[in-house]
Image (spheres, rainbow, N blue to C red):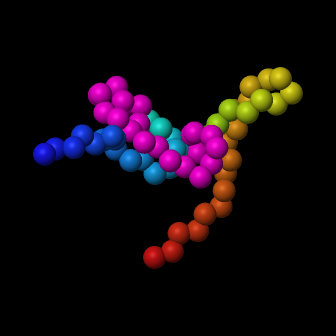
Amino acid sequence: MNTPKPYDYLIIGAGLFGAVFAREAHKAGKQCLMVDKRPQRGGNLYCEDVDGTVAVVLEIERKIFRQ
């Protein structure tokens, strides 16, 4: 017996790539669940209300990758 899956894709991280992937998958008829630790989608790129004006914010963090 096949039990239907509630989601076709689980997307970890709602940054730019995750958000675009989810959008394209949804357009293709797929169900996606996207989770992220931040309250906003878009990762380091998001909109914020600054004194009644919508501002695009880009957070740049220093990241060090080690192998």
Left or right relative to 22: residue 3 = left
> What residue lies at 31% left-to-right and 33% top-to-bottom?
30
Q: Residue at x 64, y 44 (%)?
A: 39
Q: Quadrant of residue 24?
A: top left
Quarter of the image where the N terminus is located: top left
**Corner quadrant of residue 21:** top left
Camera-nearest residue between 35 and 52 = 35
Residue at left offset 74%, top offset 25%: 54
| In the image, residue 66 lies in the stretch drawn in magenta | no
- Residue at the limit of the structure toward the right, as seen here: 51
Query: Is residue 25 in view?
Result: no
Q: Nearer the viewer, residue 20 or 32?
A: 32
Q: In this image, 41 relative to 11: left or right?
A: right
The spot of residue 41 in percent (x, y) is 57, 39
Q: Among all residues in the image, which is located at the extreme top?
A: 52
27 shown above or below 4:
above
Q: Is residue 59 above or below residue 23?
A: below
In percent of width and height, residue 62 lies at 65, 61
Expressed as whole percent of the image width and height from the top left, the position of residue 44 reads: 62, 46
Region in magenta: 21-44
